Every structure is written in C-alpha cells, then in structure tokens.
Amino acid sequence: MADFQTPALREYPIIPLLHEGTMAHSRPFVAKPEHQASVGFPGELVENWEQKAVDKLGELVSKSRALQVFLDSCVKCGACTDKCHYYLGTEDPKNMPVARQDLLRSVYRRYFTFAGKYFPKLVGARDMTKDVLDEWYTYFHQCSQCRRCSVFCPYGIDTAEISMAARDVMDHVGLGQKYSNEIIGKLHKIGNNLGLPEPALRDTLEGLEEDVKDETGVDVKFPLDVKGADILLITPSADFFAEPHIDGLIGYAKVFHAAGASWTISSYASEAANFSMFIGSHDNLRKVALRIRKAALDLGVKRIIFGECGHAWRVAYSFLNTLAGPFEFLDPKYPVPQHICEYTYDLIQRGKLNFDKSANDNLVVTFHDSCNVSRASRMGDMPGGQFKIPREVIKACVNNFHDMAPDTINESTYCCGGGGGLLTDDLMELRVKGAMPRMQALKEVVDEHGVNHVAAICAICKSQYTKVLPYYKFEMDMIGSVHGLVSKAIRLNPVND
Amino acid sequence: MSVVTVIYAILFYAAALIFVVGVGRKIFIFATTPQPLKIPTTPAPTTRVGVWARMMREVVVFESLFKSNKWIWLFGWLFHMCLFAELAWHLRYFTEPTPLFVTWLHWFTNFTGFGMVAGLLGLWARRLLVDRVRYISGPSDHLMLALLVGIGASGLVMKFIMHTDIVAVKAFFLGLLRFSIQPLPADPALMAHLAMVALLMIVFPVSKLLHAPGVFFSPTRNQVDNPREKRWTRGWSAEYDNTKLDSAE
C-alpha cells in the first residue's frame, strides 16, 4: 500500500527503544501563497525571518501564562517519554513529548533566558536557524495536540500548547501547512471546511430526508436556515457527506424528530470544526467562532447543540463562551453550547426515547474516546461526564459493549493518529504509525471479546480510522458514529408522556 | 575575623539576594502573564476548592507522576520529601528558639539525608540507563544532580563522620540575619556543603528548579473547569466586546 512498514501489533504493548531520525523525512505540503493570504499570513518566508520568528515567540510567551510556565518548568524527568502515540509508533526520539517541546524550548532559552544567553551549551540552547525551522516544520507536524502527555506530566506541561505556538510562529514568518490553512480559508469564505455552498447543502439535506423516508417511512426533517427554530445544530461538515459520519447526522435528526424538537442547521455556520486551534491562531479561532454567534442571532434560536466532533467540542465547550460570548440572548435553562450526546442522554434519562437494541445485535461495540473530548472538555455536570455519557448512549442502543484496556481509554485514551491538523494524505506514514497504540488496544478486544465495531464521536477519528484500519488488517467499515448506533436502534413513533 | 568567614558571609548575602530577587521576579512574571483561554487537563475540578485539592495532591503526593511512572515517582517523591524534611530541620540554624515542630523531626533526620541521596542516585541512574531519559538529559541535568548529591553527601559526612561545630554554624547564620558577622568553622565538609548550597540558590532562578513555583501556576492544573457556567476572559481574550458586533452589519 505504501513505501513504509506498518508497525506490527504485538501480544502485549511495549515501549520501543529509540531509533533516531526515523521520521526526519516527514513533512506535510507547505501552504501556497494564496492559502497563506486567506488566513492572514505572509505567502512565503519573509525577509529577516529569524528575528521575526524570535520576536513572535517572545510575544506569544508574554501573552500566555501556559507557555511561560511550560517553557520554564520542565525538569526532563522522563515521565512523558513513553506517552505519545507517535513516539510509540515511529520510535523517533523527537516524537517524545519533552524532546518535541525542546525543539522550541531550546530557542526560547537562547533568546529569553540568562542561562541560554550565556551558557547555551550547558542548557541546550540553540540559535534560530534554517535547520531549526525545518526541524520545527517536520516535528511540530507530528503532534496531534491530543494532550495525553499533559495528563502524565507532574507540572501539567501540555505539548499541544507548544506545538500550537510553534505553528503560529511559522505561519507568521510565512511557513504554513497547506492542509489546515487551505481549509480555514474555505471556512472563512463559504462557512464550512468542504467549501459546500448553501444550494449544495440544501440539496444534500433534502436527499437525506428522502433516504430516511425510504428507509423508515417517517418524515424526518433536516431543516436548513429555519428562522425561529429552538435549536441550532452545529456539526462538522464531514457529517453531510462522509461515511460513516453521515449516519451520525441521520441519528441526530431522528433524535430531534423523536423528541419533537424544533431545530435547524445554518448555512452560514455550517461547520463545527475550527482548525484555527491546530495552527494556534487566535485571530482565526475567534473569527470562525463568531460565525456561530452571528448564525444564532440571525436565526433567533434558543440553544446551540454541537454534533460529533472532537476538537470542535473543545473549542465549543472550552472556548466558545470566551471567544464569541456572552450568550445572554439564548435560553439560560441550557448550557451553551451542548453536545448532542448530552442532549440524547438527557432524553434517554427522562424516558423520552424508545430503542430496539436488537437492531444492533450484529455488532459487538467498543468506544474510542476522542482526545479533545476526553482531556480538554466535559459533558454533563460531573468531571468525567465526557466518558460516561457517550457510553450510556451507546449502551442504550446496543446489547454488546466492551471497553478497551483501561490505560488506553478515558483520560488515557490514545489518539486515532490523525488529529491536530494531520489528517492529510501527505502524512499517511505518520498517521498509520501513530495509530499503532490505538490499533494494539483494539486488537486486544477484537481477539478477546469479538469486538467488530468501534463507535466514535469525532469526525477526524472516523475519517482516520477508515483510512488506517485496513493497514492493520481490520475492515474499514468497523468504525461508526455513536449516533449511527442511535439511528439504527431508535424507534421513531413519539413516546407519549 | 577569618577570610573564610568574610567570604562565606558575602557569598550567602549575595546568594540570598539573587535567590529572592530572581525567584520573586519569576513568580511575578508567572502571576501577571494572562492565561487567555481555559485549558485545564480534564477531567478537572469544577470548583475552586476542588482545584486546591487537585493542586495539593500534585505537590504532596505527585499524583500525575504516580500515574505516569512508578520508578520516577518513587525516586522523585523520596528525594523531595526528604529534602523538605531536611529544609525544615535546617530551620534550627536560623531560629532561636527553634520552633517546636522542628525538634519533632529529630528522629526522621536519621534517614532523610540518606533518602535524599538515594532518591537522587535513582533518578541519575535512570538518566544513564534508560535510553529515552538519556536522550533528553543535557549537561545541566547531570550537573544539577551532581550538585544536589554533593549537598546531601557533604551533609551526611558532617552528620555521621566529620562533625562540625554546629553551635558556631548557628551563631554564624543568626549573625547574618542580624547583620553581625560571627566566625564560621573552616571544616572542609562544611565549606563544601555551604558553597554548594549557595551555588544552588544562585542558579535556582535561571534553571529548571523553577518547576517549584511553576507547578502552582500551571493552567492545566490550576484552572476550574467551568467555561460554560462562567465566561472566562483574560489578556487578549478580554480585549473584545462581541455585543458591539451584533448590531453592526
């Protein structure tokens, strides 16, 4: 399938020995000038870029307590060294979280600390050179910003924050990543990552209505731009087209239908994803988030619900109120925003939904905790609700459920290997190798419990699994949406109160 | 007044000044740098009290490190707890009368010096033997361990082999606090011990020892997980008023 070796799955997971330079060749395509322009960055490497990069780094550190503390506090204890899926899958030491951080920390030290200015060799401080920049581009695009390292760091140092900062510095001197920047540009222009304009979106949704009608005989609506609807659904645009995402969208629509809810999708804010987080760009992050505020105001909705998307839920849960709030114009009875799993779970708790679990009896299901949901957000009232609620929704819809190994789920979940702006074909080797720890854990439940289906609540996870499962000799359609399971099991006659 | 006494008096005044000003400056920077977004590593406490409990678990039992790696936790925790006991025990050189709780440590301090050095040697062994930790260790990481082992070892030498006149040592440090310089015994082990302690104080503000204040300011550990309930704005995120956008168009 490709000119690299898919890592072997073993009987037991191991911590590999270092193999220097195994991923030194990995580089995503560089953004073209027009992609750069669309997100407000220079088109190519600017003059005097070394100084500008250092200045930008200094500015970012002075504006972020996280960066300041993380860059000053690492003691090189080694706790994180075996926690990154990219290290475990590639064995390249620069994919150890601390080593990745040090690519940037070495420059910070050289220009901003006493020890680095006067004793650079002693503390491993480096000048900002072309080699350093190239190394940044290579290895800061081998971090999916999954935050697994930050769980295990005694100081909570989060490599995601550092890789975001590094990408932001690179963008500011004219070295951007094509995949993320092109997509953010499309989102600014049209309203979603796919560049899907309103008529095409309307067409798609009408097609879905017909499909569901054919399948169930019920008129399940997929409303678009309905003013005065109660609920605005913001969902990743992959839900409109990609498999298995679309089954999730059908599931949300059926839940809304069964609940008798008034809801709508917005063509202006037809995207939950916000890749600006991946490139650490605050201006772009805010600009995208404000589309949602505007859509909610224009449509006059009462509440906002997000579909299944990992990083989008982080941006929504953790940042939306900060970036695009306050949301006093929405109904104060509901959190802003809500996750579709919270919504469905609440209906289940209140006995408002009816399920026929046997519709999923051909499946033995496991759940993949998505990183951003697990380690950067919450669902419900209680810490850890982000683990419990999706599982409860699944269990309401299936008879056969088995979790993967405890050290690979919940807060310790392994990234699918495609998050953080790396879900692009030019990084296929990285994606396949980075998926190894997750595939290893999956293999264990496949072998022991006959698991044949993985449910996820992230558009990136779903696309990534579809691509990498075959490399590990699994069926590509093993991956599904949590609301795909809901869609199969839900009975559409409204339940009487 | 011997030359040694004068040199050590100056050394400790300088070291104390550098330590206080340097660490104070860094704490000021940590405290005044805004954290514009909510980034606690979740699941995180949803209340301030919960955050205090989480932080206590981090700094007292090293919760995250325990989850991560039992060897690093064992050596690291042993070292830090013994160091902490020793620091408290050394208060008797700076206080008169000595606070009661310090005297309670008497029994423990038969072991804490050894515990410190054993923990450090364990951590050092990992730096030499585990390929991943060897890869990330720089010269300063080894030198820092050497310095701390030196401090512990010279202390043990004084405690168990070559005793020094601790009454005179106490008089010296109480004297420093009162700006009246008293003679310091010129024992080699004491000279070495004090020189290394002074060096540690001097490098503290410019080294990775900043993890000590740093951990308290780490946003992934000290933020309350309540972004939906309470709108969070700091720094650049506080510079905008979105309600002004609503009527524009």
Image (cartoon, coloured by chain):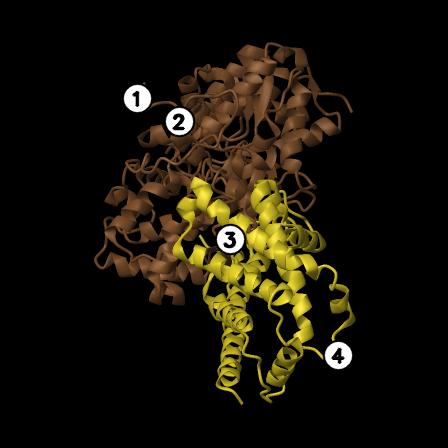
Chain colours: A brown, B yellow
Please report, as a chain letter, where disc 1 is located: A
> Are the residues under badges 1 and 4 in a single subunit?
no
Let me know if residue A211 appears in the view: yes
Q: Which residue is mark 2?
A: A432
Let me know if residue A64 appears in the view: no
Which one is earlier in the sequence, the residue at label 3 or at label 4? Answer: 4
User: For the residues marked 1 and 4, what is the alpha-carbon distance in whole angstroms?
Assistant: 75 Å
Does residue A414 sit above or below B201 in this rendering? above
Regarding mark 2 in the picture, which secondary structure is present there?
Answer: helix
Contact between marks 2 and 1 (CB within 8 A): the answer is yes
Using the image as rendered, state which of residue A42 and residue B42 is in the foreground. Answer: B42
Regarding mark 4 in the picture, which secondary structure is present there?
Answer: loop
Contact between marks 1 and 4 (CB within 8 A): the answer is no
Q: Give the quarter of the image for residue A347.
A: top right
Q: Residue at x 38, y 42 (%)?
A: A94
Q: Give the quarter of the image for residue A268.
A: top left
Q: Which residue is mark 3?
A: B246
Position of residue A159 measured from the top left corner of the image (x, y, whole percent): 46, 46
> Are the residues under badges 4 and 2 in a single subunit?
no
Give the label on residue A403, or none: none
Q: How many residues crowd mark 4 within 10 Å: few (<14), some (14–19), many (20+)? A: few
Using the image as rendered, state which of residue A284 and residue A297 is in the foreground. Answer: A284
Using the image as rendered, state which of residue B237 and residue A387 is in the foreground. Answer: A387
